[in-house]
Every structure is written in C-alpha cells, then in structure tokens.
C-alpha cells in the first residue's frame, strides 16, 4: 500500500513540475502581450505606409520627370526658336543697314564725281554690291535710275554711249577678263516686260529704269527696263516717297531675275549653295531709295535700289545638324503665308499656307521682321510687313520622349517592393529572435522562481533606484576704472571682472565726413591718400586738444569727436560747434594748400558735418585690440544728421540746438526750411549753424590759443578766392591747376637735367652750335602732324655708368628764368583751352595726373626682382660688389620698361603731351566737324582734326622765342628737340582712337611686337651682327612706343569713364 502511494506521489511531482514550467512561459508571454500587440499594429502601419509611400513616390517621380521632360522640351524649343528669331531679325537688320550703306555709297560717288542724275554710273559697282549681297544673302541688286519724261532723249544718248563700256567693265570686274562676254543688247527707250519679251513702255511722267546690276545679267536687254511698269510695284514708288529712307518689301512673287540675272540652272545652283533642299524658293523684293544728297533724306529721290532675296536664305545654317523639326511660318499683311521646316542647317519650303501643328500653338514665338524707324511705316500702303511665327513639331519633340518617367517609376516601385521584402524578412528574423528571448526569459524566470519565493522575485523584478545632485554659482566683484583707462593708466584687463563701462547723460557728438573723398582717392596713389588724411586729421587733433574736445576715432575719411566725455561739462554743445567751425575752416585752407602737391580736385574737398546731443554709453570692449567705444542712439542720430547735411555746412539736431539756446547762442542757429527724414527716425527738424559770431565768441577763440591754428571765417572762402584772374584770364581754380602742373613738370625737367649731367661725365656731349637757329623746320615739324606719326620711336640705349652717376634730381636747382618761362607756358596753354563741358584744362590736368601716376608705376615697378640676377643674397657683400649689383638692378629695370625708365625726356614728353592733347578743342567730335565741312577739318584733310590742331598750336607756342631758355634746358640739341617732337606727335595722335589708318598702324605694330612667330626669323636671309643688333633694338623700341601711346590713351579714357560728370 505504501509503495503504490509512493509511485503515485512521484508521478504527481513530475506533472506539477511541467505545469509550472508551462506557466512560466505563459507568464512571460502575458507580460509581453501588450508590447506584442503594439508591434503587430505598428507592423501593419509600416506595411501600409510602405505601400502608400511606394504609390506616392512612384507617382510623384513619374509626374516630376514627365514635367521635367516636357520642360526640357520647352526650354530647348525656346532656345532654338530664339536663335532662329534672332537670326532672322539680324538678317533683316543687316539687309536694311547694308542697303542704306550701298545707297549712300552710290550717292557719295555721284557727288564726288560731280555727276548729275540720272546720268550716273557708279564705279566698281559690282565690287561694292558683292559685299552687300554676301552680307545680306540677297541674290541680286539693281540700280533703278529715275528718268523724267523730258530726259528720255538725253538718257537714250547716255545709254548708247556707256552701256557697252559698262557691260565690259562689269564682266572684267567679275571675271578678270573679257572672255565669254555675253552679247550686249540695249534698248534705247525704257521697256516693260511682256509675253513677247521686253517691249517699249508706254509714255509716263517718269520711269525707274534698270541700269547697273549685280551680278551682271547674262542678257543686257534687261538694261533700261522700267521696274515700276509692273502693276504690283507701282504703289511701291508712292510708299518710298512717303517713307523716305526706309527699306520696304514687296509681296512674295516669282523671281523675275531668274532668267535675267541668272539662267534657271544658275539660280538653282545658287540655292544649292544655301543648303536648301527644297525645289521652290519664295522670294520678296526689297526697295531702298537713293537720295540726291548723302545723309539728307529729305532730298530728292533720284534712284531706287531693287533686289530680290529668298526667305530660305535667312533660315539656313542656324541650328546644329541633330536639331530637326522647327517650323517657321512667314506671314505678311498682304494675305500671304509660307511655311518652312528647319532641319539642322537646312530650311525646307513646305507650302504657301500655314502648315504648323495647332497642338503646339502654346509654344508660338512671334518675331517682327518689319524693322523701321518711321512712325508712318505701319500705316503706309504699297508694301508688305512681315512677321515670323515659330513652332515646334512632333519631329522636334521626338528626341525628348525617352520614356524616362516610366523607367524611373518602375525602378522606384521595384525599389519599394525590394524594401518591403527586406522588411518582412527582417521581421521574421526579429520574431524568431523574440521567441528565443521569451523562452530564455521564461527559463530565467523559472530559475529565479526556483531560488526565491514569489514575493521576493516580484521585488527583484519591479524594484527601482534613483539619485539627485546640485550646483554652485560664483559671483565676482565690481571695478570702476573708466577715467583711468582714458588717461592710459589701466593696469589690468581681466575678463573675469566686470566690464569697464559708464553712462554719460549730457554729451555732444560730431561726425565730420570728407565729401567726394572716395572719387578723389580712387585716382591717387596710396601715399597721397594717406598724406592728405594725416595732414587733415592731425590738424584736427591739434584743434581738438586746444578746444578740449575728445577724439573718439576715425572711420575711413570720417572724423568722430565728442564733448562731455570723459569729463562732464555744461558747455559741451557750444564747444563742439566752435570746434566744428574751426575744422571746417581749417579743411578749406589745407585742401587749397595741398592741391599743388596732390593734384586737381583736391581744393574741392570739404567737410559735411553733423552734430547731435544726448546720452551715450561709453566703455572698453575687451579682447583682441581692445579700444574705447561709444554706443547708443545718440551716435546713430549724429551719423544720420551728418548724412542728411550739406557739404561745407554744420548741421545740428534739435537737441543740440536747445543746448545752444540754453547757453545763449540762439543767434548761431538758422532753422532748416524743410524737415529731414533719417532712417529709423522719421521726420526731424534740424538747424544750420550760421556765421553769427560776436566779439565775445572771437575773444573765446583767442583765449583758447587757436590763433596759429585756425582762421575763423566763412567756410568755403579764403583770401583772394573769389573773382581773382591773372593776365591770361584764368580764375583761381585754374591758377591752382597751373601751379600743380608746373610742379609736376619741374620735377620731370630736373630728371632730364640730372640724366644729361650724368651723361656728360662719361660721354662726349656735343651741344648745338647755335640753339637759336633751331626752328620748326629744323626738327621736322609740319602743318599736318598726322603725317609725322612713326611706327617706332627710338629711345636711348642703356648705359649703366650713367645710371649709377646720376644725382638725386631733387638736389638740382633750375634757373629762375626757366621756372618763370615754364609757368608762363603752362598758363598760356591753360588759356588756350576752351570753356566747354569736357575737353577743358581741368580734364587735361586729370589726364596729366594719370599719366604721371602710370609712369611712376612703370619707372618703379613692384613686380620685378632688382636683386642679383644670379639669385644670390648680397646682403653681406662688400662695397666693391655693390656697384655691380646696382648695375644689374638698373639694367633689369631698363629692360623691364623697354627703356622708358632710362629716358627722363620720354617721361617729360608723355606728361607734356597729356597737358596739350585737347588744346583749343571746340567740344565737337571730329566726325561732326568733318560732316559739317568745318574749315579746320578741311585744313587738316578731314583726319584727326582736333588732335592735329592741338599739336600745331601747342608746338608753335612752345617754339616761340619767349620760351627759348626753357627749350634750351629741356632739349639743348636739335636731335633731342626732334625726339621730343616725335614723342609729342605720336602721343597726342594716339588719343584719336577712331582714325582707321592710325588704328591699322597700331594693330600692325602690335602684331610685330608681340605676336610674331619665333620661327619667322629663320625664314629671313642671313644678316650681319650689326643688323641683328639693330633688329633687336627696333623690337624693344617698338614695344616702348606701344607703351607710351597706351599711357595717354588709358589716362584719357580713364578720366572719361571714372567719376566724371558732364
């Protein structure tokens, strides 16, 4: 009995163990059931999201690429249609311009030959016409002479006498000889076309008979044909009389020149050259009036240019060969329409109607081909106005239909399918992993259950622990040391301490900006810019120190000062006004003094001053380059007051004005008539400071110790400023420019003298036997300087001993007579300039300044290495080697500048040429003088009129006896005077950039100097050593001549384009 019990008990124990294990697994599942449900939900969400995203992205991709594909199609069509349209317009414009040019050339030839219309035969007509035909792509052109009825007999006689010679000349002009000359047939009377051929025309008041023709007609029976006997062309004559100088176009019609100017085979061959594969070629006829007087389009119309052109000629060779299917529909207001298809470089005529596909109407580009500049052109009957309508076609669109949207949509869809598959595979692996984790967790739970009671197990699973923390803060001490910092005694800039800053409630701030400084400084050397700023601002600093005004800073050309900082004072506004008047007056005095050394326009610089009173925050902004700064609305307002002020006046705010009134200085104020509008401030009432100083004010100035610093007076005025003129009629401004030019030329003359003295020490220097015998004829001067222009100007060869022995030019003292004559010469030159808007003495001074500036860059370049040519460091060389190094440096500089740096006379000539290049210029361009037939233009043979006149007058002045001493100082020998003359002529003539012959000379010179092949020398016959040496010298001098002419050209153009207002 006991045994049975025992067995039963063991079985029960096993069953209980299995049940407990199953319960642990279910327990883990139950604990993770909620998360499992969430995972399943999110799995479904992700799946649906993937599907939705796949559909959306696929559709979006397809739509985007489809739109992009059509956008590419649309963009390509816009590009190519613009090309076609622009080319058509350019062709029409070239045709009209060429037509007018040919008409003017015919008139000009007739005028120059003194011939009377209609008895005119244009010399070399076919040559001129061929140029026009090639430019305009027209096929033929004829001159239709207008013959009045009462001129018929004389015209017939003229034709009989000239037609054979004209036909022979035309044949020779085209073929070079008289071989294959076609038989000449000529009608004595005007003819008209008929089925039987050319027959005598009916009597008319006038005829337009064909006379000259290009190309030469194979049947000269075409000569004397009355073109306007054709009924369709008769309204053309009326239109020409109405529109005067406009090119008008006929309707599209059969080309009658085919069969007259060409055989049918020749006509087809002509179109085959145009790459037109069509067998039909619609033509229009273009007519251009020929006036009796060149340029006078109101004069009588004595002839008409008539010619035909095929419309396909303007549509070929426009597009790449792979671009096909551009449809061009040509329409006119004569109810004609013609359609072409452009395939690459070919244009194919499709039919005399609109054949474009209407589904492409939205892409239509319309190009107006009726180019004109006459208001009655659109409404005048008798001619047709054309337009071109450009469309794409299916053939053009086909290359852009590449099924890219479908391909990409399929790829995107497949990508999402692949992602979904990967996701599901991943989910399977995650599920399997989670099952293993659950099983492992159940086993772990079972182990814990076997080791701990259930309540302990629960505590182990659910127990939580936490922690907390804190923070500490530190504070620093305050330090006040603003006044110590301003005094320069600040001992520490520890960034951990409190910043150094204070608030000043009562201050006055001044902004003083130099007006027009940017334009002035842009044409000066950096040293001149800083020299002026240092001179002006250092003078302001002295006044500020005397007035006890605090200088805050200088920002560019703006001077910022303050009163009431760092020491408070109740009269801060009064002191600042006095300081402002002092610096304004001082600025006027300094700029007038500096104009002699700093060039034109320096005396025009002045201050624009703005003053405002109010509180500011001031302190030290620590860190790198720490400095004292002011902040606050007062600073901004003061800046706005300055910006809205006027040059040469003191502009103050209402707040500053109130302080002045409080101090009893209301008589200083002039209320501004209008409110000023400042950025961020709106409308502001402001005041000007007048000249209402009383005796107490002047006494306070004396007490301040300013007697030697400032001269209180009206800003912008100084002694002798107004109304002063010398014996040459020059005003004060011109006299200042004369002084500056004299100073510059004196410096250059000293260099000439220094170089000559050094040359005398090492070379035999033979002076002229009699300087007084030198005259204009001796130096080769003529009345037409243009004929004296040379391709090459010879410069002296380099002599290193001369370069080393030359003394400092500033140590040379010129004879007082030379200086006086130079001043008188410059004054006389200034008086020879006319008072026109641009070509005046001030412009010449600017050009002179620019030339001198460029010469300084050439003579002292920074780009070359003047060290030992072998590249050795000679810093420790002995004295014996220094001379050799100096020789090498001078030689390197000489070669780098093509010898200009070694010849002070060249530098003087460049500056002198700039000074005289517009002498006696009337302000009228050369072209206008020539066109008006001015006497001076005739005098100089209608070429470089103003330039030649300037050279003749200035050189005649320079060669006068009263400047003999000056000439002897500059050019003591005839050879030097000749070289100076040549330099002046070439330089001044270089300012004429329009003359064709001069331009060709310059271009040829440039080609020889810089673009000649190195191997070309090998093709020349063998030369001697001396000849090769001379060729090398010519090459250097040629480049030097180019540089010299470009100096004055660049300077002249630079002043034209930069900061110059007429």
Image (cartoon, rainbow, N blue to C red):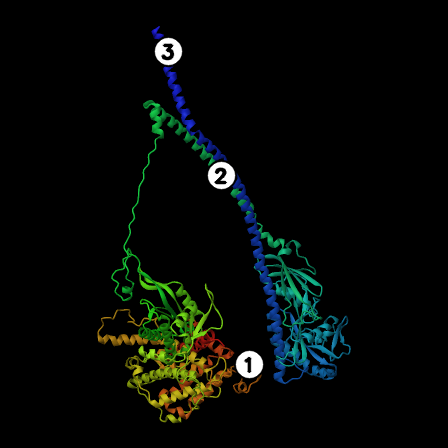
In which quadrant of the rendered image does the N terminus lie? top left
Kindly report the distance in space between the C-alpha atoms of the residues bearing marks 2 and 3: 60 Å
- Report which residue position mark 3 lands on: 8
Q: What secondary structure is marked by label 2?
A: helix
Kindly report the distance in space between the C-alpha atoms of the residues bearing marks 3 and 1: 137 Å
Near-viewer residue (878 or 475): 475
Q: Sequence-wise, which precedes: disc 1 or disc 2?
A: 2
Image point (55%, 83%), residue name: 929
Kindly report the distance in space between the C-alpha atoms of the residues bearing marks 1 and 2: 81 Å
- Report which residue position mark 1 lands on: 928
Q: What secondary structure is marked by label 1?
A: helix
- Report which residue position mark 2 lands on: 418
Image coords of residue 856 (percent x, y): 36, 76
Near-viewer residue (268 or 408): 408
Image point (60%, 69%), residue name: 93
User: Splitting the image into 4 quarters, where does residue 729 fall?
Assistant: bottom left
Q: Sequence-wise, which precedes: disc 3 or disc 1?
A: 3
Q: Sequence-wise, which precedes: disc 2 or disc 3?
A: 3
* As drawn, 292 above or below 10: below
Residue at the far top in the pictured view:
1
Q: Are the residues tagged 2 and 3 within 8 Å (C-beta)?
A: no
* As drawn, 857 above or below 271: below
Image coords of residue 287 (percent x, y): 67, 73
Q: What secondary structure is marked by label 3?
A: helix
């Amino acid at each position: 009995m006991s045994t049975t019990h025992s067995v039963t008990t063991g079985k029960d124990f096993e069953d209980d163990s299995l049940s407990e294990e199953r319960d642990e697994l279910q327990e883990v599942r139950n604990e993770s059931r909620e998360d499992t449900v969430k995972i399943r939900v999110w799995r479904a969400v992700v799946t649906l999201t993937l599907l939705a995203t796949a559909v959306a992205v696929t559709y979006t991709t397809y739509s985007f690429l489809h739109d992009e594909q059509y956008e590419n199609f649309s963009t390509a069509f816009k590009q190519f249609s613009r090309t076609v349209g622009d080319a058509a317009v350019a062709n029409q414009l070239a045709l009209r311009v060429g037509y007018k040019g040919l008409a003017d050339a015919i008139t000009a030839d007739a005028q120059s030959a003194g011939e009377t219309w209609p008895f005119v035969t244009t010399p070399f007509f076919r040559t001129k016409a061929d140029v026009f035909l090639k430019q305009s792509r027209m096929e033929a052109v004829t001159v239709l002479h207008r013959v009045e009825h009462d001129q018929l007999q004389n015209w017939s006689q003229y034709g009989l006498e000239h037609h054979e010679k004209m036909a022979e000349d035309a044949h020779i002009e085209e073929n070079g000889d008289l071989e294959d000359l076609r038989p000449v047939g000529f009608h004595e009377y005007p003819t008209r076309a008929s089925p039987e051929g050319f027959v005598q025309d009916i009597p008319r008041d006038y005829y337009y008979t064909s006379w000259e023709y290009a190309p030469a007609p194979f049947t000269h029976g075409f000569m004397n044909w009355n073109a306007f006997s054709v009924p369709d062309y008769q309204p053309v004559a009326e239109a020409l009389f109405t529109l005067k100088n406009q090119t008008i176009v006929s309707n599209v019609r059969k080309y009658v020149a085919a069969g007259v100017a060409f055989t049918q085979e020749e006509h087809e061959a002509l179109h085959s050259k145009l790459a037109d594969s069509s067998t039909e070629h619609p033509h229009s006829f273009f007519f251009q009036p020929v006036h009796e007087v060149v340029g006078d389009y109101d004069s009588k119309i004595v002839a008409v240019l008539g010619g035909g052109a095929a419309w396909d000629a303007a549509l070929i060779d426009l597009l790449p060969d792979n671009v096909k299917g551009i449809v061009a529909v040509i329409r006119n207001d004569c109810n004609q329409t013609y359609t072409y298809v452009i395939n690459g470089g070919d244009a194919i005529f499709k039919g005399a109607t609109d054949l474009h596909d209407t589904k492409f109407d939205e892409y239509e580009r319309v190009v107006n081909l009726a180019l004109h500049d006459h208001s009655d052109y659109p409404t005048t009957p008798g001619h047709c106005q054309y337009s071109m309508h450009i469309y794409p076609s299916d053939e053009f669109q086909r290359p852009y239909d590449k099924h890219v949207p479908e391909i990409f949509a399929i790829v995107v869809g497949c990508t999402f399918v692949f992602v979904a598959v990967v996701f599901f595979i991943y989910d399977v692996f995650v599920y399997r992993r989670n099952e293993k984790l659950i099983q492992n967790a159940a086993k772990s739970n079972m182990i814990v259950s076997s080791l701990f009671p259930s309540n302990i197990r629960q505590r182990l699973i659910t127990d939580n622990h936490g922690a907390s923390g804190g923070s500490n803060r530190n504070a620093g001490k305050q330090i006040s040391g603003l006044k110590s910092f301003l005094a320069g005694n600040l001992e520490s800039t520890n960034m951990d301490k409190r910043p150094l800053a204070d608030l000043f409630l009562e201050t006055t701030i001044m902004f003083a900006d130099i007006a027009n400084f940017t334009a002035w400084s842009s044409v000066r050397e950096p040293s001149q810019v800083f020299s002026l700023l240092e001179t002006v601002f250092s003078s302001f600093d002295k006044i500020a120190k005397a007035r006890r005004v605090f200088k805050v800073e200088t920002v560019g050309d703006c001077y910022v000062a303050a009163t009431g900082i760092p020491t408070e004072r109740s009269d801060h506004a009064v002191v600042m006004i006095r300081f402002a008047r002092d610096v304004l007056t001082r600025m006027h005095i300094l700029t007038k003094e500096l104009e002699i050394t700093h060039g034109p326009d320096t005396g025009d610089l002045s201050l624009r001053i703005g003053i405002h009173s109010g509180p500011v925050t001031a302190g030290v902004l620590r860190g790198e380059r720490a400095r004292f700064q002011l902040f606050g609305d007062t600073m901004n307002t003061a800046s706005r007051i300055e910006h809205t002020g006027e040059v040469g006046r003191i502009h103050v705010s209402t707040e500053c004005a109130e302080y002045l009134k409080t101090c009893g200085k209301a008589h200083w104020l002039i209320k501004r008539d209008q409110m000023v509008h400042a950025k961020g401030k709106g409308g502001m009432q402001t005041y000007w400071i007048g000249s209402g100083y009383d005796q107490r004010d002047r006494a306070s100035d004396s007490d301040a110790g300013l007697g030697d610093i400032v001269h209180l007076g009206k800003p912008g005025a100084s002694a002798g400023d107004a109304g002063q003129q010398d014996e040459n009629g020059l005003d004060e401004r011109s006299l200042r420019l004369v002084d500056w030019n004299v100073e510059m030329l004196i410096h250059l003359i000293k260099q000439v003298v220094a170089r000559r003295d050094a040359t005398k020490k090492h070379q035999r220097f033979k002076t002229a036997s009699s300087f007084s015998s030198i005259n204009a004829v001796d130096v080769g001067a003529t009345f037409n300087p243009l004929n004296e222009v040379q391709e090459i100007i010879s410069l002296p060869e380099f002599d290193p001993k001369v370069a080393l022995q030359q003394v400092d030019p500033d140590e040379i003292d010129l004879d007082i007579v030379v200086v006086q004559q130079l001043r008188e010469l410059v004054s006389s030159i200034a008086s020879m300039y006319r008072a026109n808007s641009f070509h005046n003495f001030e412009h010449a001074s600017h050009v002179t300044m620019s030339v001198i500036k460029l010469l300084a860059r050439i003579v002292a370049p920074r780009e070359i290495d003047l060290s030992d040519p072998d590249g050795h460091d000679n810093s420790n060389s002995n004295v014996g080697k220094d001379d050799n190094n100096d020789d090498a440096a001078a030689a390197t500089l000489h070669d780098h500048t093509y010898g200009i740096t070694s010849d002070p006379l060249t530098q003087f000539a460049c500056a002198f040429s700039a000074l005289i290049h517009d002498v006696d210029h009337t302000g009228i361009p050369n072209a206008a003088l020539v066109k008006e037939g001015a006497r001076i233009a005739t005098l100089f043979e209608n070429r470089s009129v103003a330039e030649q006149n300037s050279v003749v007058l200035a050189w005649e002045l320079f060669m006068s006896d009263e400047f003999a001493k000056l000439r002897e100082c500059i050019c003591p020998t005839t050879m030097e005077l000749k070289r100076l003359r040549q330099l002046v002529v070439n330089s001044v003539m270089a300012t004429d950039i329009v003359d064709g012959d001069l331009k060709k000379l310059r271009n040829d010179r440039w080609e020889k100097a810089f673009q000649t092949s190195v191997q070309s020398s090998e093709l020349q016959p063998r030369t001697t050593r001396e000849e090769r040496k001379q060729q090398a010298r010519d090459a250097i001098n040629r480049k030097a001549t180019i540089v010299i002419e470009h100096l004055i050209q660049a300077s002249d153009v630079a002043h034209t384009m930069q900061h110059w207002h007429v």
